[in-house]
Image: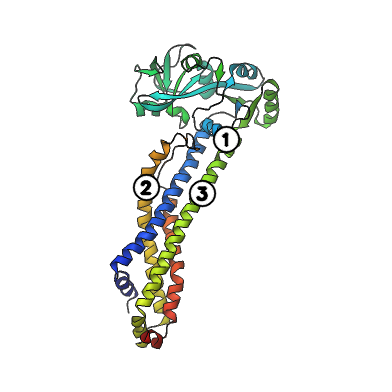
Amino acid sequence: MNLLKFVSRNLFRRKGRFAFTLLGISIGMASFVALLSIGGNMQSVVKQKAEGLGANFLIMPENICIYNQMAIVTGETISEQLHYDVYESVKNIDEITVIPHLTQKTAISEMPSVVAGILPEETMSFKNWTLASGEYFATQDENTAVIGINFADTRELDVGDTVTVRGQELIVKGILAETNGNDDMTMFVPLSVAQRIFDKEGYISYLSAKVADMTKMEFYEAEILSVASVQVATNDQLLESVLSILGSVNSTLQLIAGVALIAAAFGIINTMMTAVFERRREIGILRAIGGKKGFLFRSFLLESGLYGFLGGIVGVVVGYAVSLFAAPIINKDELSMLKGVSAQADIDVQLVVIAVGVSLLISILSGLYPAWRAAKLTPMEAINS
């Protein structure tokens, strides 16, 4: 007897039950794919943004919370500030190059936007920017802006356009070449201009620093702390703190996905046990005419596996569709603890393979007991029942 023909006939015998069982495993796998896709991509985004800071370490307000640390890494605004005098003190320390940042959030072209106040000359030297078009700042206090390339694209801005920030008109003087970091989605203005527009005279958000010798980090930190009451963290330390939060979020998402998969597994067990009960007489006849236990065991196990394989494929498609829909909603949540971490739904081939594999494995494991029960029946027990 042909195994595949036997299994396919039984699989579609009860079309309603087949559809609902497949729906159960598909929903479970869709949850698995959607949650892990968004969670995993958030970590990738944070790592990429941390690398784009271009500093050896950051100097932040004392006792800054993890929420604001995440905001610094992701290019968002923070609720605490440093006095400008801190910059004046730290820049005089030998072997340390430091630049100030004042980051503020506002609406530009009806879109939430980050505006960063910088010292033009010092920041250009620190970051080694190049321009895609236009010109860079000529003075430290001109009412102009240099914008990141993604900032320009998403707001349809070009060199010479005028943007209004809290009533102050600024002319777009230049557009930066792509940096693959936060700078691509930021509008930069001279520090004095930003302080005036946002009523932050004498204040900055944080400092970025580079050092001459990475082996002397503890020495530099001690020197900084001797002249200012601040918090100092290397890029790696800051990234580790932020990723610990995302790790907790990912663990929660994985737990939720795991519960969905367990529910799907019990759905398959229930379906297969029902199939064994309904087909007891058929099983008895097969056994009576010479059907082997191994054939019955393999047929039920294959049937269960097909549920997992088909459900895995459907779940991957639905899961990515859900994540594409959910990502923009998550990104609009300004109260989220994942401040500035853009949820994305990029297709990960490895995750697709894992999802289908996990679905297949769960289905096969769920089908072991029903398959064993079917193979264990004797011809007399099956026919009499």
Crowding at mark 3 (Cα within 10 Å: few <14, some 14-19, many 20+): some
Secondary structure under the numbered disc 2 in the rendered image: helix
Amino acid at the residue labelled 1: Ile
Instruction: Give the image location of residue 305, x and y in percent.
Output: 40, 66
195, above or below 151, in the image:
above
Q: Quadrant of residue 176?
A: top left
Secondary structure under the numbered disc 1 in the rendered image: helix
**Disc 3 to disc 1, C-alpha distance:** 19 Å
Q: Which mark is residue 66?
A: 1
Instruction: Give the image location of residue 100, x and y in percent.
Output: 55, 21
Q: Mark 3 vs mark 2: which is more N-terminal?
A: 3
Secondary structure under the numbered disc 3 in the rendered image: helix
Residue 287 shows in this picture: no
Q: Mark 1 vs mark 2: which is more N-terminal?
A: 1
Instruction: Give the image location of residue 312, x and y in percent.
Output: 39, 58
Q: How is the image coloured?
A: rainbow
Residue, disc 2: 322
Crowding at mark 1 (Cα within 10 Å: few <14, some 14-19, many 20+): some
Residue, disc 3: 252
